[in-house]
Image (cartoon, rainbow, N blue to C red):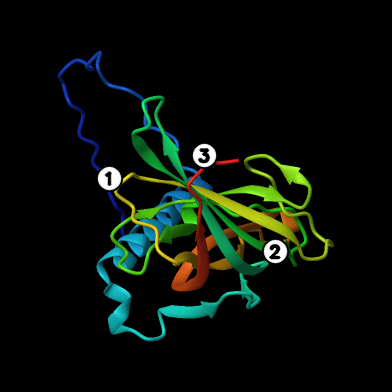
């Protein structure tokens, strides 16, 4: 004997609201990953600011000036930094411009750039933390320049604007989050590789030269 199943459908007798809108399409996976990555980077910088990494020796990796270190597809090394005061026409201090010098390259299969959201510049007290950006790679002096695959270590300069309350000493710190590579395609295509922040933070402590003239 075959059991028959009855499916009941309930219809709402009320008229369809004119304010009803069709269901939205799902949010792209890449957008979700990007948002989560930004949140994690922000959390990392905040933790660094309040000293949260001091309780975990494996979260903060100390890097000495001139030492080559690797994070994701990047090989990087920073040697020194220079800072200049920025003043108004009346001579009032309105901030500082700092340049951090080093070398870098990508070992990956596609071009990539160092994103400001991955990095932070601060002093030893970590009272002021600002995001730098890659200003120069090799002979290219422009914002957003990328490392090209297959190239050797090239001169690299980061730039950051610091507030007037920053008090420069003889050293400065650059923090760069650990970068993890992930391929989001089933085929393993190079274009499917995305970069996201990891759980560690590389901290480069380097000498700082303080100038009393305007930035170059």
| Rendered position, 71 above or below 8 | below
Q: Secondary structure at mark 1?
A: loop
Residue 210 coordinates in the image, percent (x, y): 48, 56
| Rendered position, 174 above or below 57 | above
Residue 33 coordinates in the image, percent (x, y): 47, 54
Would you name the residue on which mark 3 appears? 214
> Counting residues from the N terminus, which is met first, the one under dot 2 or under dot 1?
1
Q: Residue at x 55, y 79 (%)?
A: 64
Neighbourhood count class around disc 2 (C-alpha, 10 Å): few under 14, some 14–19, many 20 upward: some
Q: CA distance from mark 1 to mark 3?
A: 79 Å
| Rendered position, 25 above or below 107 | above
The reply to whether residue 2 is visible in this rendering is: no
Q: Residue at x 82, y 65 (%)?
A: 152
Q: Secondary structure at mark 3?
A: loop
Q: For this rendering, which residue is in front, 19 or 133? A: 133
Q: Residue at x 21, y 29 (%)?
A: 11
Residue 7 numbered mark, or none? 1
Say left or right for 108 vs 169. Answer: right
Would you name the residue on which mark 2 appears? 103
Say left or right for 156 vs 213. Answer: right
Looking at the image, is mark 3 or mark 2 nearer the viewer?
3
The reply to whether residue 205 is visible in this rendering is: yes
Contact (CB < 8 A) between labels 1 and 3? no
Q: CA distance from mark 2 to mark 1?
A: 69 Å
Farthest residue to the left: give it. Answer: 14
> Counting residues from the N terminus, which is met first, the one under dot 3 or under dot 2?
2
Looking at the image, is mark 2 or mark 1 nearer the viewer?
2
């Amino acid at each position: 004997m075959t059991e028959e199943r009855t499916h009941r459908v309930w219809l709402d007798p009320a008229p369809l609201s004119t304010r009803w809108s069709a269901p939205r399409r799902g949010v792209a996976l890449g957008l979700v990953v990007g948002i989560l990555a930004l949140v994690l980077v922000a959390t990392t910088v905040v933790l660094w600011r309040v000293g949260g990494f001091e309780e975990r020796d494996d979260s903060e990796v100390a890097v000495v000036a001139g030492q080559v270190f690797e994070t994701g597809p990047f090989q990087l090394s920073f040697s020194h930094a220079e800072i200049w005061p920025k003043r108004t026409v009346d001579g009032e201090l309105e901030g500082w411009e700092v340049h951090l010098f080093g070398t870098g390259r990508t070992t990956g299969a596609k071009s990539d750039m160092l994103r400001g959201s991955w990095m932070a510049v601060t002093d030893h007290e970590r009272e002021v933390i600002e995001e730098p950006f890659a200003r120069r790679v090799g002979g290219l002096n422009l914002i957003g320049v990328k490392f090209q695959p297959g190239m050797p270590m090239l001169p690299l300069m980061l730039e950051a604007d610091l507030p007037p309350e920053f008090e420069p000493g003889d050293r400065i710190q650059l923090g760069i989050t650990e970068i993890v590579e992930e391929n989001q395609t089933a085929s393993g295509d190079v274009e499917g590789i995305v970069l996201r922040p990891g759980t560690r933070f590389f901290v480069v402590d380097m000498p700082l030269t303080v100038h009393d003239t305007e930035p170059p």
